[in-house]
Amino acid sequence: MRTIDDFNFEQKKALIRVDFNVPLDKEFNVTDTNRIEAAKPSIMKVLEDGGSAVLMSHLGRPKGQRNADMSLKHICGKVSDIIGVQVKFVDDCVGPDAERAVAELQEGEVLLLENLRFYSEETTGDVAFAEQLSKLGDVYINDAFGTAHRAHASTTVVAQFFTDQKCFGYLLAKEIKSIGKVMQTGEKPVLAILGGAKVSSKITIIENILDKVDHLIIGGGMTYTFVKAQGGQVGNSICEDDKMDLAMKILAQAKEKDVQVHIPVDVVAADDFSNDAQTQVVDVDKIPEGWQGLDAGPRTLENFKEVILKSKTILWNGPIGVFEMKNFANGTISVGNYIDEATRNGAFSLVGGGDSVAAVKQFGFQNKVSYVSTGGGAMLESLEGKTLPGIAAISEG
Ligand code: AMP
């Protein structure tokens, strides 16, 4: 894997695909600077080597049209503050103005290009557009994991114009390494904790992951499809009746592959999908009619704790209960705490994909796990075993 550390950028112009798709308020202030901070190490490496950096990103979904509200010029000041260099801005991402701005760039300087998605050619992966982008740097660095699963011009197609002058930035390299630690080289026992609402959205992950793990914890709304498939009564709990056969197939496959599956044995059931609902703890297979399971129960959490604490590699995707409601957040918080403890005891823990990151941030676990993935969809596709085009474009060729 060729990373930024394999290059010296002295007198080189680095064209860096970053993910500056940050949230803005009504006055166009950046309300969450995480993604900008995450891109800083790669930018600094280029500058410290004596090179210059040309940054390209998308912001929002302008759908191929210029849109002043989604101009990257709004974030220029914030990027300057964070990296400590006055960032220049050019209001195009290809063409003569962009090329002139790049030509004028001196070593130690940073140029931010206008929003890539003002051109529909970006998302269609247009080769001619990618070739125009490629004129804006001597070396191409991809540091945007969040878009690595898209075969867009700036994330994938552009790489073909750099032969061997291309690499992963620090952020992307770390994502690839962390996922590799779980999917290929994880120390045993390897545990995957999969929660979230539906079996249907996680099925490909489950099928792929059965070959990599020793233990599988199933939590969240997915639980009830598995329980009903085995003859349990799940009351009004979320359940995909058409996925019950699939659930049984997964359990059979797991057995064949010697994967131990841990499903909740008790749940916090509620008489309404509401934080103010009446609740009772019941066995997972005896949920009364009119009640629905919204969180894991105490015996379940004891079981999960035991498995988590003996695991050396832990992947967590998807909440254990309806964590957005305070009264049903305990399962998700407890699992986060057990993973924290396992990590302090030396386990490697990776959290990512969809809502798990929201839960991790909401409860402050981001510094307690080994790694929080920044790419929702990209992370999910990696776990499904897919090769991400943005990664392949750099690895191959
Ligand atoms: P996902 O995007 O598939 O990871 O699903 C996340 C959502 O699943 C969150 O919004 C949770 O509130 C929801 N969820 C977790 N457990 C349950 C449950 N027992 N019943 C209904 N929804 C749930």
Image (cartoon, grey):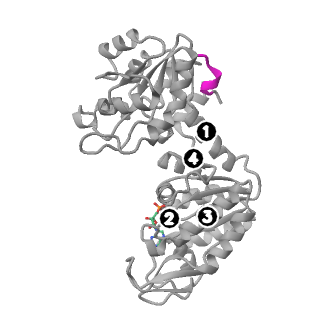
Q: Mark 2: which secondary structure?
A: loop
Answer few, some or many: residues within 10 Å of disc 1's Cα (few below 14, many 20 plus, some between 14 and 19).
some
Q: Which residue is mark 4?
A: 382
Answer few, some or many: residues within 10 Å of disc 2's Cα (few below 14, many 20 plus, some between 14 and 19).
many
Which label sits on residue 196? 2
Q: The N terminus lies in which quarter of the figure?
A: top right
Residue 113 image point, x, y percent: 36, 24
Asked whether the viewer can see residue 31, the reply is yes
Q: Mark 1: which secondary structure?
A: helix
Q: Nearer the viewer, mark 4 or mark 1?
A: 1
Q: Nearer the viewer, mark 4 or mark 2?
A: 2
Q: Which residue is mark 1?
A: 174
Q: CA distance from mark 3 to mark 2?
A: 18 Å
Mark sitting earlier along the chain (1/3): 1
Query: At x 51% / y 22%, what residue is drawn?
Result: 140
Q: CA distance from mark 1 to mark 3?
A: 24 Å
Query: At x 47% / y 59%, what residue is drawn?
Result: 362
Decide whether residue 51 is among the magenta residues.
no
Q: Viewer-proximal residue, 341 or 96?
A: 341
Please tell me in which quadrant of the rendered image residue 89 appears. top left
Q: Nearer the viewer, mark 4 or mark 3?
A: 3
**113 to the left or right of 151:** left
